[in-house]
């Protein structure tokens, strides 16, 4: 299945702003990964229940269910307990990063997301694409 698009690793992009989801989708797809999108934490949890992604990029500040609550809940589910979750936030305070890591995030990126930083992060958390 080497050339099958469905064999590509999947990144779930969770953000309530459509323009930011589009930007992240573009960057992640340029790196060769498949992208699935959610507008809030509740949608992310539903997506994970149906098909667990290989990595989640999780905005922290969203309506309906924020990224911290969604991460805590995902860490209790067998489908997502080992999936890397990367918090994405415009908040640069150390406390925000500490809160994200305490909730179960593996990494913390600040907005605006740098393409090279994202490339390095995905390379760290995901196996090399075939």
Image (cartoon, helix red, strand yellow):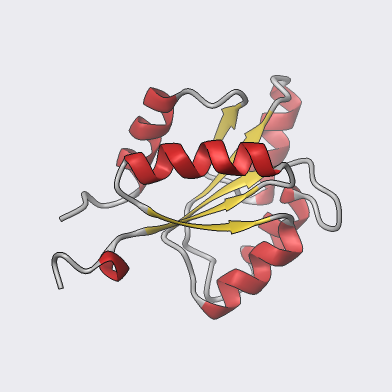
Residue 130, x across and y down, in percent:
15, 55
Depth order, front residue of 62/77: 62
Residue occupying the point 57% across, 70% down: 48
**Residue at 48% over, 23% down:** 114
| Residue 26 pos. (x, y %) | 45, 40
Q: Residue at x 34, y 40 (%)?
A: 30
Q: Could you tell whether 81 is left or right of 94 in the image? A: left
111 lies left or right of 10: right
From the image, which quarter does the N terminus lie in? bottom left
Q: Quadrant of residue 3?
A: bottom left
15 horizontally vs 81: left or right = right
**From what the image shows, is residue 23 above or below residue 83?**
above
Residue at left offset 54%, top offset 66%: 81
Number of numbered discs visible in the structure rendering: 0
Residue extending furthest bottom? Answer: 50
Q: Position of residue 93 (x, y in %)?
A: 73, 20
In the rendered image, the vertical position of residue 25 relative to residue 8, given as above or below = above
- Choose between 5 and 107: the one closer to the eye: 5
Instruction: Decide which of 8, 67 is in the foreground and name it.
Output: 8
Residue 62 in the figure: left or right of residue 21: right
Residue 96, image x and y in percent? 73, 30
């Amino acid at each position: 299945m080497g050339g099958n698009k469905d064999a590509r690793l999947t990144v779930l992009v969770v953000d309530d702003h459509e323009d930011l989801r589009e930007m992240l989708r573009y960057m992640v797809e340029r790196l060769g990964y498949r992208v699935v999108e959610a507008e809030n934490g509740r949608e992310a949890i539903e997506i994970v229940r149906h098909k667990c992604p290989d990595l989640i990029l999780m905005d922290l500040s969203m309506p309906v269910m924020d990224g911290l609550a969604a991460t805590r809940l995902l860490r209790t589910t067998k489908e997502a307990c080992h999936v890397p979750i990367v918090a994405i936030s415009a908040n640069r305070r150390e406390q925000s990063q500490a809160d994200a890591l305490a909730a179960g995030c593996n990494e913390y990126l600040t907005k605006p997301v740098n393409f090279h930083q994202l490339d390095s992060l995905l390379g760290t958390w995901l196996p090399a694409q075939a």
